[in-house]
Image (tube, rainbow, N blue to C red):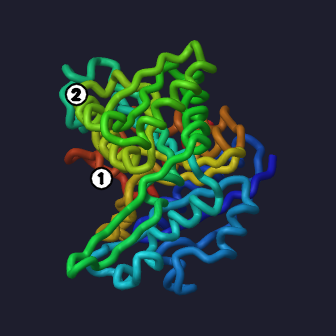
C-alpha cells in the first residue's frame, strides 16, 4: 500500500529523532511491502527562521494532503533563544496551537506504560505499583478550554488584570468522551473521567455529558475523579487507571505527570487525532536544546509515535505490533540510551535507531 506521510522535524533534537523514526518506517515498508512517501513540513522555530512565522498556511495545506503527520519536537531555550523575544502569537509553540486548531486535532492520546526492563527507573516503589506495573492512556481534549478561550490583559485603575476564559460546549465534550470510551472497549473497559466538578460549571457540564455517553457503553465502567485527587492517585496507585479522559489543561498537566512515573519521558509516544483517520504523532518530550546535535537523544518515543501512526491513521496493526515488539526486544536484550542507562553502557541516537530498525520482522 502507498501512503503519504508529512514529517515535521521541528527544533532542538527534533530532526535527530524524526530521522530515526523514518528509518524504522522504511524498515516497515521494506518488510511488509508498503511505500511511504515523505513530505517535509516546517513548524516552530525552524519555520520562524525561514518564514518569520511558526506555521504558514501553506504548511497547513501540505499537512492536509497527507495521510498522517509525524513530528519531532518544537521550541527552544526560552531564556536564550531569539524566538522568545517575539510576541506570544509568533513563538514556536503558537504553531502547535494553530495546526491543532486548523486540522481539528481535538483528541490527544498519551500512553503511559511501564516496561518491565525499566522498573528500576520508575520513581515509585515496586511494592506500590505491584508486580505487573501499569498501562494507562490519557485522552486529553486538545482544542478547547483555557488554551483556546478569549484572553484579556488590561490596566484598570492602575492595576494590571489578566483574564483567560475556560469554555466548553456539549459537542466538544461528547466527541472526546466517545473517543475515550471507544478506546476503552479495546482495552480493559474502564474510563476515569477527571474534572473539577465541585468548583467549576464547565466541569459540571463535562460530568453530565460523559455520563450520557457512558449509557451507550454498558460494558465500560465509568468513574469520576477530581483532578487534585487524580494527581495524587497517579503516584499512589497508577495501576488503577486504564483510560483517563479529561479537558485540555488538566490533561496537559496529568499526562506529563504520568509520563514521569514511567521513569523517562523519552520513552512515551503521543497522537493527536481529528474526527477522521488523520492524526499528528509526536513524542511526549520537549526539544531538549541542551543536547541537540550531540547524538545522544532517545529516539524511542518518536519511534513508538510512528507505531501509533501505523495503527490509528494507516490501519496497519500488524506493522505497528512489529515496531512495538522491536522496541521491547531492544530493551529486553539490555540495550539502553543514555537517559535510561543508569550508568550502563548506552547507545547513541542513530545506533539505537539502527538496531530497532534491524529488529523489525
Separation (CA) of disc 1 from disc 2? 28 Å
Left or right, 307 with respect to 119, comes to: right
Q: Quadrant of residue 65?
A: bottom right
Query: Which of the pair 327/140 is nearer the observer?
Result: 140
1 versus 124 height, above or below: below
Q: Earlier in the sequence, mark 1 or mark 2?
A: 2
In front: label 1 or label 2: 2
- Secondary structure of the residue carrying tag 1 is helix
Residue 138, horizontal then vertical, whole percent? 44, 37
Residue 57, horizontal then vertical, whole percent? 66, 75
Residue 258, horizontal then vertical, whole percent? 33, 39
Q: Which residue: 59% across, 35% down?
A: 179
Name the residue furthest front: 157
Q: Which residue: 63% across, 63% down?
A: 102
Graded by Cα atoms within 10 Å as few (under 14), some (14 to 19) or many (20 or more), the crowding at tag 1 reads some
Left or right, 315 with respect to 8, comes to: right
Query: Which of the pair 77/197 is nearer the observer?
Result: 197
Residue 158, horizontal then vertical, whole percent? 21, 81
226 versus 202 height, above or below: above
Q: Which residue: 54% across, 71% down?
A: 43
Left or right, 59 with respect to 161, comes to: right
The disc placed on residue 338 is 1
Check the picture and name the quadrant holding the C terminus.
top right
Residue at the spot of label 2? 236
Name the residue furthest top: 219
Name the residue furthest right: 1
Amino acid at each position: 500500500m502507498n501512503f503519504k506521510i508529512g514529517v515535521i522535524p521541528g527544533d532542538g533534537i527534533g530532526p535527530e529523532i524524526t530521522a530515526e523514526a523514518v528509518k524504522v518506517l522504511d524498515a516497515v515498508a521494506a518488510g511488509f511491502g508498503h511505500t511511504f512517501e515523505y513530505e517535509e513540513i516546517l513548524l516552530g522555530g525552524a519555520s520562524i527562521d525561514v518564514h518569520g512565522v511558526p506555521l504558514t498556511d501553506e504548511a497547513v495545506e501540505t499537512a492536509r494532503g497527507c495521510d498522517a503527520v509525524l513530528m519531532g519536537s518544537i521550541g527552544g531555550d526560552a531564556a536564550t533563544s531569539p524566538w522568545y523575544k517575539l510576541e506570544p502569537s509568533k513563538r514556536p509553540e503558537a504553531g502547535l496551537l494553530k495546526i491543532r486548531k486548523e486540522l481539528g486535532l481535538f483528541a490527544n492520546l498519551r500512553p503511559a506504560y511501564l516496561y518491565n526492563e525499566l522498573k528500576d527507573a520508575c520513581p515509585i516503589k515496586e511494592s506500590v505499583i505491584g508486580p505487573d506495573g501499569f498501562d494507562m492512556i490519557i485522552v486529553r481534549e486538545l482544542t478547547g478550554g483555557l488554551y483556546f478561550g478569549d484572553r484579556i490583559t488590561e490596566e484598570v485603575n492602575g492595576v494590571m488584570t489578566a483574564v483567560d476564559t475556560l469554555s466548553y460546549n456539549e459537542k466538544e465534550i461528547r466527541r472526546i468522551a466517545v473517543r475515550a470510551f471507544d478506546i476503552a472497549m479495546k482495552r480493559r473497559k474502564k474510563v476515569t473521567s477527571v474534572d473539577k466538578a465541585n468548583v467549576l460549571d464547565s466541569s459540571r457540564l463535562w460530568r453530565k455529558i460523559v455520563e450520557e455517553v457512558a449509557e451507550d457503553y454498558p460494558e465500560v465502567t465509568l468513574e469520576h475523579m477530581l483532578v487534585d485527587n487524580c494527581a495524587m492517585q497517579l503516584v499512589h496507585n497508577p495501576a488503577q487507571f486504564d483510560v483517563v479522559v479529561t479537558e485540555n489543561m488538566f490533561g496537559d498537566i496529568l499526562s506529563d505527570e504520568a509520563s514521569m512515573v514511567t521513569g523517562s519521558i523519552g520513552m512515551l509516544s503521543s497522537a493527536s487525532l481529528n474526527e477522521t483517520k488523520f492524526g499528528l504523532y509526536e513524542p511526549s518530550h520537549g526539544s531538549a536544546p541542551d543536547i541537540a546535535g550531540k547524538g545522544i537523544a532517545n529516539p524511542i518515543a518518536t519511534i513508538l509515535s510512528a507505531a501509533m501512526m501505523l495503527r490509528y491513521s494507516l490501519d496497519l496493526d500488524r506493522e505497528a505490533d512489529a515496531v512495538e515488539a522491536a522496541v521491547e526486544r531492544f530493551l529486553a536484550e539490555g540495550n539502553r540510551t543514555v537517559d535510561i542507562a543508569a550508568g550502563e553502557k548506552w547507545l547513541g541516537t542513530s545506533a539505537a535507531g539502527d538496531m530497532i530498525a534491524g529488529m523489525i520482522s
